[in-house]
Image (tube, helix red, strand yellow):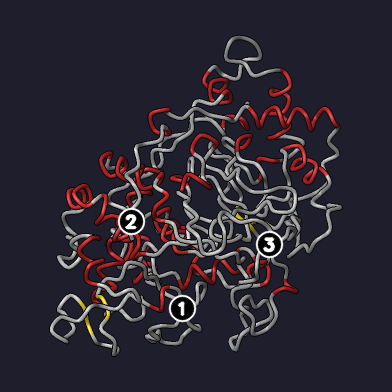
Amino acid sequence: MPLLEKHAGLTDPAPDTSNKYALDPAVAAFGKKLYFDPNFSGKEVYADMLLRPMTSEGRAPMGMPINVSCNSCHDVTRGGSDHTSDPPGNRVSFGGGAYDVNGQQTVNSAYNDLVYWNGRNDSVWGQILAVVESHVSVNGSRMRVAWRIIDQYKAEYQQLFPDYPLPAEMDSVAAQSSRLEADGTCKLVDNACPPECHTTYGPCLPRFPFDARPGFVEFGAPAVCNWGVDDPLLQPYKDAWDCMQLADQLLATRIYVNFAKAIAAYEFTLLSKNSPFDKWADAGFTQTGPAALSPSAQRGAHLFVGKAACAECHAGPLFTDNKFHAIGVPQLGDYVPTTADCPAGGWCDCVSDDTGVPENCLPDGARDGLRKLRANRFRRDSTWSDDEECRRHFALHTDVNYAAEHPTECDSRIAWYSLPMTDDLKGQWKTPGLRDVARTGPYMHDGVYKTLREVIVHYNDGGVHQLGGETIGVIDEKIKPLNLTEQEIDDLVAFLEALTGEIDPAVTAPPTVPPASAF
């Protein structure tokens, strides 16, 4: 049993040193409310990741609130996965628009070192910051987050985050509403712009508008205030964010970061353990008795670490090597982009920019994720991280002696950041953990397979499929035909089903969410 023993003994996740609130029960309880609150979300935009119009039904009519919470697409009673997509053509996730990938599970996400299928974030809180403002996901804004907190969670926020007091000018939603005209500009007082507003860019604008988030600018280009430009995808909310003063942008971003860290603290409580496999392992992998798996699942376990070679990538107690592999999964689905959808100069460019590196080539997987991770402003070495040693370590990691004398949890990420952005990363996607996998279909990065049996057949055929679509990259050398029988496939499915664990029902029970805000 030595090979199976390597998958036993799941411990608690290591503390996230970039989030000092990660293990704070009070912050986690607050984060749970935020996780279930649908009032941070924005409106339906009927667009996909390439900004193309959607052809299927969205969450709401165009321009209407989508009313989604984190739990809408990451149901904590189902492994924290998305069961709201519309198979067979649309197995990606839907929010304000259509994602290019299948939503990943939040249960046991606390164990992740890199987050997302393509690895473009290095913390759970950093991932939350990305999805809340993504037009295809929550489609919210950091100013909406701030005002929602002011309106319904002010006292709780101030108690939990005393080091970051809320701006006095953000007194209440009602007071702010009384100060604004219908177009979002400030009402003049005695024909003058009042002190809680500013005229930095011409019009009298609120320092803290109700809705604002960074819009799209060309890489390397400065953000410019274009008040009144209201593109729901590229420059939403009349370009209100770029028309804020820098100091106020930083204040709003701090509230937004604390919001994300609170939700991350809740996700650190979403731990699935004590699966039938764990009970079997604790009993010494006995063939009979109350803790024994079914004969089929036991056979599947031995196939998993033997003939089927699943454990080569799905390793350890989490059943993942935390690496990236190209396994022959096609880019297939109504909203899953192919390289043909990403021409030179386009929003998604799989050809090249002036540097010779493709810009936002979504089908590339890990190569595009690495590019995004390098440019990520919310990495654990950023000013928003609570890990001072990590920030210092990143700044000095080129000093071999310093790195050797000051080991930190950042080391594995430094190795990832330093990877050359080469073609061998094309089509590689992160190996997901398999705990609770029976709950988290559809499967693969684009949800192309509905059942676990279909997944095993894919591997049994050596990554060769008959589905059509485009296959990106070179299939990993580990992916070879397995010659499994029908019974052996059934046995593997039985073993995977035995990885379904238990979560404290008090952790997953929905909290009472405050009423919607009037803005």
Secondary structure of the residue carrying tag 3 is loop
Tag on residue 347? none
- The location of residue 214, given as percent across then percent down, is 41, 74
Say few, some or many: other residues with alpha carbon within 10 Å of mark 2 (under 14 / 14 to 19 / 20 or more).
many
- The location of residue 99, given as percent across then percent down, is 60, 60
Q: Which residue is mark 2?
A: 18
Up the image or down, 257 lies above or below 371; here it is above
Q: Is any part of residue 136 visible from this angle?
A: yes
Residues 365 and 252: in front is: 252
Could you give the CA–CA distance between mark 2 and mark 3, rounded to whole angstroms? Answer: 34 Å
| Direction from residue 36 to residue 433 in the image, left or right | right
Residue at horizontal 53 percent and vertical 60 percent from the top: 96
Tag on residue 230? 1
Q: Which residue is mark 3?
A: 335
| Direction from residue 367 to residue 29 in the image, left or right | left
| Number of the front mark, 3 or 1 | 1
Secondary structure of the residue carrying tag 2 is loop
Residues 27 and 328: in front is: 27
Position of the C terminus, as image quadrant, is bottom left
Type of amino acid under label 2? Ser
Could you give the CA–CA distance between mark 2 and mark 1, rounded to whole angstroms? Answer: 35 Å
Residue at horizontal 71 percent and vertical 47 percent from the top: 87
